[in-house]
Image: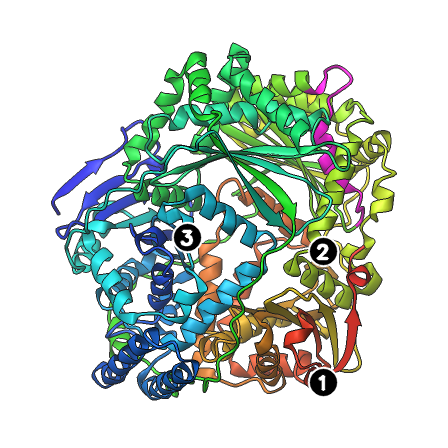
């Protein structure tokens, strides 16, 4: 160990301290001890992303390869396997040099034949299985422009195994099962291309960043994806995956001094080396107003965007520019752009300020009012708002309150293991130290109003990209499905020598931690239908107070519009601006959320202003003032939501599922029709708000104040008008079908089909069946080792997304039936292939008892690693109470599944799924699907958008 330094002072809470080490090979280690949750978040970050091999897709391809194992992981005989893998690599180089389609097809068939032979030596998904075996959950990775990161959460007792597996992963990754993974990446490309606006964003990004590598899509272009070079991919690994270019980020329940020898022993094995030095590509200034049109597939709605040159990460102007943007948009809606919306001068507008490692994005988007306002008039209002900042036309009080808001945002992002680890990854990737980040709080204090005005004049200049939205869409690049033989490794349940050796490492047994209903959260009855749930904040002096009324949109669809409307009004005593600016001065925020089961009033602030903030919230609850002019904003927002919803295949697939499950009781059919939304009056919405406040309420407080003091403030300040009990969680009985049926919604411009499967199960009469349902769902389609993932994605590349679940009724509705639901998305011309495999798995589920322990371990990991953070624990406990539990249900669940055998899964499957009529729902492009063959899966019922979405 060469260097070790504590990056924060001793007064900082331990959970916010990060210790930085450098291993002998030059690899950086950041360790953050936090014992508040029984888990560790671990990540390996490589400072190499899409910009380092622009437009090729190689960095992202390689991210996928890193799940395929190494010379030791995932193979039964690497020496024999390598002979075939080397031949495959040669064939891919030949493919990249060949343009004749017949020759290409021949080469691909030869690659396929070699891949099938190589699979004889493969142990598929062994890396994932090892992570799971040793306490891991949430295994994933991501490729950005600047870096690639590999991460998961794991149980602390498996620290040595995690370090061993993840360091081994980086020593000698092997490009096995590449042909099928290539098709999976195609599926990912298709998925993104179907997302509404994705192509528009891609075109805009290209124009904005030209000639920087950020201009190219992270996944690469289609032509390069069709011609991957394993040789270039290996070169990318050898160039960038060296110790000095890597960071190991760990946050959670461990002792830094104890784990450092483990990390030194394992991660010091990674190759040392230095990456080639490259000078960043300088982005030229825009020359005056540079105009460009971008197509977006939503009619009626107009839009203008102004793109300015922002700042890269680490730039000295970054903190001041954040404040300047906060003067345009902020969490209290008091920014100059916010006021344009609140006052109904434009339909919507927002500022964007993002910093990547080598460049920043700074922009403003404005959507004019529907029908009558022009782009030019809306844009003029935006420039006037920007000019106010340039001219210093904002008060010292507003300026200081925004500095306070920035501090609150900085501090809040440090609170729990997950958010802190994400922040650590980003900070490390930018070349900063943890100390640098903490010091940015001091930089906020040093700023003056003139600093902000000067920054605004510097960056919001006349030199900008002027973007106008045009209604339309871009042509999609469609890749026909390959005629490949599926690669199905025969040794899918075997283990490598490496895996068997790993079993010898000692493990310290640690019991899972469950929520203690009596100790973890303090409960105080405020009145019969109002309860305070209080938890301590051990990290900072920021409080949260959530008022969770037990009524949601399933009971009252209008609450969705109420939550929006409340953001635009003030009180009888104060105008909107007066009310919100007072909140901002206190460092507090107020917002609203309507969910299926709850209406939530969300309050944040600093504990030294708790009483004053609660008084402000009470004023709003008791005397909100209707403003009929503001209701038009809500109506116009609803119109845009309607137009956007019906353009999204994901949204429509969810609406189709709801229609099939619940018929006319679908949330998308019970929602207010637009004709009724247009009739809404502010006064009527406030009557609804008053009615909501009469429903039982859980007050969730997290902060530094004593629970008794919080209760006293709430009793003396808040309107405790609750009179009726909550009906949440609402149970909706699902429909039962007596024959196989296929509901089809045609969307002619889609590349992919989204397929849901559904059948109604038997009654869930006892806890054993509830527990068995989770084990069955995990076995069938829960993770990378599930039969659905392996048979549909891993071996056949028929889908990028695959999942299965068995939805049980709320605990207090015991005895009601459950629902089996599957989901996958696949390229249009693979629809029938994917559906054929899925249908066969459902009708004849493979029995693999040798995997049972692994699936039990998976569920155990998720529960152990999902113990809630201090701000989430009270809402979790309250949800259990509303369901009818008197203790953490996970305790009985884990005890029960340890006794289960494969027979329990089979019995559950036979009782609830096997012989039930399956109903399939497909949102896809009928031009790519043989509809006659589709009828083999059931009677086809073709629906239109109006049938599933009001």
Sequence order check: which comes first, mark 1 or mark 3? 3
Sequence order check: which comes first, mark 3 or mark 2? 3
Q: Are marks 2 and 1 in contact (CB under 8 Å)?
A: no
Sequence order check: which comes first, mark 2 or mark 1? 2
State how the image is colored: rainbow
Determine whether, in the image, residue 934 is placed left or right of residue 326.
right
Residue 419 seen in the current view? yes
Judged by depth in the image, the label closer to the viewer, 1 or 3, is 3
Please provide percent x and percent y for residue 570. Answer: 73, 22
Please provide percent x and percent y for residue 17. Answer: 31, 36
Identify which residue is drawn at 32% across, 80% down.
495
Please provide percent x and percent y for residue 439. Answer: 32, 26
Q: Is residue 479 magenta?
A: no
**Could you tell me how far apart the alpha carbons at marks 1 and 3 are, in whole angstroms?**
41 Å
- Vertical order, 339 against 874 (above or below): above
Identify which residue is drawn at 85% across, 37% down.
680
Identify which residue is drawn at 19% across, 50% down.
276
Q: Which residues are magenta?
A: 555-576
For mark 1, what is the residue?
932
- Vertical order, 163 against 518 (above or below): below
Q: Is residue 557 magenta?
A: yes
**Could you tell me how far apart the alpha carbons at marks 3 and 2 are, in whole angstroms?**
29 Å
Mark 3: few/some/many CA within 10 Å (<14, 14-19, 20+): many
**Residue 470 numbered mark, or none:** none
Q: Secondary structure at mark 3?
A: loop
Judged by depth in the image, the label closer to the viewer, 3 or 2, is 3
Please provide percent x and percent y for residue 340. Answer: 66, 25
**Residue 646 numbered mark, or none:** 2
**Could you tell me how far apart the alpha carbons at marks 2 and 1 are, in whole angstroms?**
27 Å
């Amino acid at each position: 160990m060469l260097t070790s330094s504590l990056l924060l002072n001793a007064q900082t809470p331990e959970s916010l301290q990060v210790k930085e080490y450098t291993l002998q090979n030059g690899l950086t280690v950041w360790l953050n001890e936090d014992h508040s949750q029984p888990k560790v978040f671990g990540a390996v970050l490589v400072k190499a992303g899409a910009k380092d091999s622009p437009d090729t897709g190689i960095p992202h391809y390689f991210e996928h390869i890193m799940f395929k194992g190494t010379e030791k992981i995932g193979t039964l005989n690497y020496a024999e396997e390598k002979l075939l893998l080397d031949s495959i690599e040669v064939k891919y180089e030949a493919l990249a040099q060949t343009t004749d389609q017949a020759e290409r097809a021949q080469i691909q068939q030869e690659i396929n034949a070699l891949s099938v032979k190589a699979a004889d030596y493969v142990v598929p998904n062994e890396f994932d299985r090892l992570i799971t075996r040793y306490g891991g959950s949430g295994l994933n990775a991501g490729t950005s422009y600047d870096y690639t990161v590999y991460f998961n959460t794991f149980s602390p007792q498996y620290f040595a195994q995690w370090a061993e597996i993840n360091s081994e992963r980086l020593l000698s990754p092997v490009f096995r099962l590449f042909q099928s993974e290539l098709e999976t990446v195609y599926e990912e490309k298709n998925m993104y291309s179907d997302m509404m606006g994705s192509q528009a964003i891609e075109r805009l990004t290209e124009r904005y960043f030209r000639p920087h590598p950020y201009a190219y899509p992270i996944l690469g272009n289609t032509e390069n994806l069709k011609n991957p070079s394993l040789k270039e991919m290996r070169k990318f690994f050898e160039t960038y995956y060296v110790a000095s270019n890597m960071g190991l980020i760990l946050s959670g329940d461990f002792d830094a001094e104890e784990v450092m020898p483990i990390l030194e022993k394992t991660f010091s094995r990674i190759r040392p080396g230095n990456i080639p030095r490259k000078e960043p590509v300088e982005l030229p200034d825009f020359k005056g107003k540079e105009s460009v049109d971008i197509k977006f597939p939503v009619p009626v709605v107009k839009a203008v965007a102004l793109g300015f040159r922002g700042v890269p990460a680490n730039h000295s102007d970054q903190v001041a520019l954040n404040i300047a943007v906060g003067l345009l948009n902020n969490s209290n809606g008091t920014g100059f752009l916010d006021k344009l919306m609140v006052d109904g001068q434009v339909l919507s507008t927002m500022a964007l300020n993002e910093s990547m490692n080598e460049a920043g994005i700074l922009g403003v988007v404005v959507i004019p009012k529907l029908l009558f306002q022009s782009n030019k008039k809306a844009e003029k209002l935006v420039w006037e708002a920007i000019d106010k900042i340039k001219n210093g036309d904002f008060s010292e009080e507003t300026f200081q309150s925004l500095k306070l808001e920035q501090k609150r945002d900085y501090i809040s992002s440090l609170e729990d293991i997950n958010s802190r680890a994400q922040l650590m990854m980003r900070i490390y990737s930018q070349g900063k130290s943890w100390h640098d980040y903490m010091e940015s709080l001091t930089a906020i204090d040093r700023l003056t109003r003139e600093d902000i005005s000067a920054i605004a004049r510097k960056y919001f200049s006349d030199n900008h990209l002027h973007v106008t939205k045009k209604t339309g869409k871009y042509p999609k690049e469609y890749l026909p499905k390959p005629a490949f033989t599926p690669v199905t490794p025969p040794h899918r349940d075997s283990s490598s020598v490496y895996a068997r050796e790993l079993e010898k490492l000692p493990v310290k047994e640690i019991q899972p931690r469950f929520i203690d209903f009596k100790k973890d959260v303090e409960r105080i009855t405020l009145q019969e239908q109002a309860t305070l749930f209080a938890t301590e904040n051990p990290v900072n002096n920021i409080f949260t107070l959530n008022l969770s009324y037990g009524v949601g949109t399933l009971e009252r669809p209008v609450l969705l519009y109420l939550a929006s409307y409340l953001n635009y009004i003030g009180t009888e005593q104060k105008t909107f601006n007066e009310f919100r600016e007072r909140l901002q001065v206190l460092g507090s925020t107020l917002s609203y959320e309507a969910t299926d089961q709850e209406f939530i009033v969300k309050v944040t602030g600093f504990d030294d202003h708790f009483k004053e903030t609660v008084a402000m919230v009470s004023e709003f609850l008791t005397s909100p003032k209707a403003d009929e002019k503001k209701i038009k904003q809500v109506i116009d927002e609803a119109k845009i939501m309607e137009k956007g919803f019906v353009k999204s295949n994901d949204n429509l697939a969810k609406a189709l599922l709801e229609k099939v499950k619940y018929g006319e009781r679908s949330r998308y059919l019970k929602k207010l029709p637009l004709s009724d939304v247009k009739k809404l009056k502010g006064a009527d919405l406030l009557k609804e708000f008053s009615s909501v406040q009469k429903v039982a309420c859980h007050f969730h407080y997290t902060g530094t104040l004593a629970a008794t003091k919080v209760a006293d403030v709430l009793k003396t300040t808040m309107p405790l008008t609750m009179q009726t009990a909550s009906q949440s969680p609402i149970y909706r009985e699902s429909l039962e079908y007596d024959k196989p049926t296929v509901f089809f919604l045609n969307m002619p411009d889609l590349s992919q089909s989204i397929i849901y499967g559904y059948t109604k199960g038997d009654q869930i009469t006892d806890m054993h069946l509830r527990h068995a349902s989770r084990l069955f769902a995990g076995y069938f389609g829960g993770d990378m080792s599930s039969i659905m993932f392996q048979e549909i994605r891993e071996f056949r590349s028929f889908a990028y997304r695959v999942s299965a679940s068995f939805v049980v009724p709320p605990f207090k509705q015991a005895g009601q039936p459950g629902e089996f639901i599957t989901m996958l998305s696949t390229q249009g011309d693979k629809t029938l292939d994917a559906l054929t495999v899925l249908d066969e798995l459902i009708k004849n589920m493979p029995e693999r008892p040798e995997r049972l322990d692994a699936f039990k371990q998976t569920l155990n990991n998720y529960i152990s690693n999902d113990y809630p953070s201090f701000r989430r624990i009270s809402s979790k406990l309250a949800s259990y109470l509303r369901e009818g539990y008197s203790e953490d249900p996970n305790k009985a669940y884990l005890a029960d599944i340890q006794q289960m055998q494969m027979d329990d899964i089979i019995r559950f499957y036979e009782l609830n799924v096997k012989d039930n009529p399956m109903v399939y729902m497909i949102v896809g492009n009928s031009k790519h699907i043989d509809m006659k063959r589709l009828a083999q899966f059931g009677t086809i019922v073709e629906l239109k958008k109006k049938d599933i979405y009001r």
